[in-house]
Image (cartoon, rainbow, N blue to C red):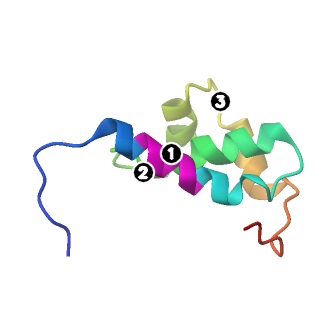
Amino acid sequence: MVAACHSVDVARWRWVLAGVLACFAGRFGRVEPRRTAAAFVTGLLADIEVKTCWQLAEQAGHARPDAMQRLLYRAVWDAGCCPR
């Protein structure tokens, strides 16, 4: 169930999002896929109707979806890593 809300605390939202992104940042060995993953998650949370790599890339300010596609198909990340 989702509660209706007329205002959003932007500072708190950014703080929560930064915490979520920090939870998985250590799973990537390089900064480029880490940044793309952050943009990908932010795009998934954005108010866009269709969420394909093209739309997520546009939301992130990329001209092409290559980085998003590379993240999904080729990025090396440690699924077993569990930073605390």
Q: Is 18 within the magenta? A: yes
Q: Is 21 within the magenta? A: no
Lower position in the chain sequence, tag 1 or tag 3? 1
Amino acid type assigned to the residue bearing label 3 in the image: Arg
Q: In which quarter of the image is the N terminus?
A: bottom left
Q: How many angstroms separate mark 3 from mark 2 (CA)?
A: 20 Å
User: Horizontal placement of 24 versus 32: left or right?
Assistant: left
How crowded pointer 1 is (Cα within 10 Å; few <14, some 14-19, many 20+) is rated as some
What range is drawn magenta here? 14-20
Q: Quadrant of the C terminus?
A: bottom right
Q: Main secondary structure of the magenta part?
A: helix
Amino acid type assigned to the residue bearing label 2 in the image: Leu
Q: Position of residue 42 (x, y in %)?
A: 50, 45
Disc 3 target residue: 64
Q: Where is residue 62 in the image (x, y as percent from the top left)?
A: 62, 26
Does 63 sit above or below residue 20?
above
Disc 1 target residue: 42
Q: Where is residue 72 in the image (x, y as percent from the top left)?
A: 73, 56
Picture quadrant of residue 54: top right
Question: Helix or strand or loop: what does disc 3 sit on?
Answer: loop
Does 24 sit above or below residue 60?
below
Foreground mark, 1 or 3, reads: 1
Q: Where is residue 20 in the image (x, y as percent from the top left)?
A: 55, 56
Question: Helix or strand or loop: what does disc 1 sit on?
Answer: helix
User: Horizontal placement of 12 versus 19: left or right?
Assistant: left
Does 8 sit above or below residue 2?
above
User: Horizontal placement of 69 versus 31: left or right?
Assistant: left
